[in-house]
Amino acid sequence: MDVLELKFLLELLGFPDYRAPISKIKPNPQTKAAERDSICRNLCDRELVAYSCEVLQLSIAPPGKSLLKLDTTRLPIAEAEVQVLKACAESSITPAQTGLSADSRQAIIHGLAERGLIKAEKTQINEVWLTQRGLEYLQDECNPSGTTPVISLDLLTHYLRFLRKSLREKPTALPQNEQELPPHLPLKKEAGSHPLVEEKREAPPAVVNPLSDADILQMIRDLDRELATENYLPIFQLRQKLQSQMSGNELNQMLYRLQRNDKIELSSLQEAIAYTPEQIEAGIPQDVGGPLFFIIVL
């Protein structure tokens, strides 16, 4: 990692939740915006940071042109999305030229870009934040070397505060004798202990009826309708709904099974916008590329 990349990460440590407008990050006073954005994208490619961006110029992609030739009333695409495709069907346009309201058009444009229906010809990074991988790198793997004085005391302070906070948040180890006890088993009886205490046992856990694939599929439809996500339900919404009923891995396996049975499709998130790092990390990680993030009912 070069010096400017390291400074970029250390600058982020000085902001709440390690998240900041990109304009506030200045690895060096003379660093130009284009160079800063290039550093940000390089760090994002290595999964050390993530960022949200705004589309400034867009054009239709070949799949979008093909879609406009079909009967869009029978396809899982919203009227506003069709409006965007028609607006840029002949030439590249700005978001304002889509005719959509300013508070909704970026989300719709990003959704179309993620599905490959339009091309984002020009973008602008708005906000950047450290990912969990970036935090782990700074905490466990960062080993800069050299004798040239390149880090200011302010950046050093950011790093020291980060390390102290990380140490405070680590769970305290149990005493050795408690670590060796199997979970949910009572301590060994001691002579002279009260008989009522000796007979105390934990109540058996309540039995929860397992959810079937059909139950999950219906829950996806209900959540999509309730949240108006237009058949692009973020996985974190389903996780929140089911967190008390099944583990994260159990939900992942059920979603994979529904996909194999052609009940749903899972789509990745190409651009991070309007979602927090925790929501993005609640997707299903992939070996290559970003996590699977959206659920589409077929």
Image (spheres, grey):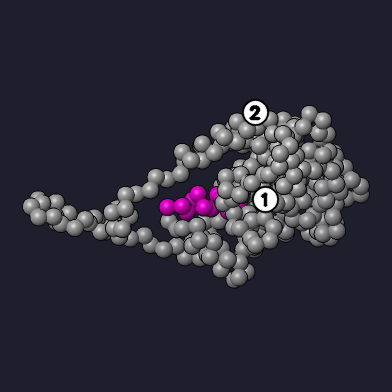
Q: Residue at x 14, y 51 (%)?
A: 197
Disc 1 crowd rating (10 Å Cα; few below 14, some 14-19, many 20+) is some
Label 1: state its secondary structure.
loop
Specify the label residue 69 is tagged with: none
Q: Which residue is nearer to you in this view: 66 or 161?
A: 161
Which three-letter amino acid code belongs to the residue tagged 1?
Answer: Glu
Which tag is nearer the camera, tag 1 or tag 2? 2
Q: Which residue is nearer to you in this view: 278 or 36?
A: 36
Q: Which residue is mark 2?
A: 154
In the rendering, at what x and y percent does residue 195 appear?
9, 53
Q: Which residue is mark 1?
A: 47
Q: Are marks 1 and 2 in contact (CB under 8 Å)?
A: no
The image quarter containing residue 92 is top right
Q: Which residue is nearer to you in this view: 39 or 288?
A: 39
Magenta-drawn segment: 234-244
Disc 2 crowd rating (10 Å Cα; few below 14, some 14-19, many 20+) is few
Q: Residue at x 46, y 38 (%)?
A: 168
In the rendering, at what x and y percent does residue 235 appear?
58, 53
Q: Residue at x 59, y 54 (%)?
A: 283
The image quarter containing residue 94 is top right
In the rendering, at what x and y percent does residue 87 appear?
85, 45
Q: Quadrant of the C terminus?
A: bottom right
The image quarter containing residue 70 is bottom right
Is residue 228 on the magenta stretch? no
Q: Is residue 89 left or right of residue 153?
A: right
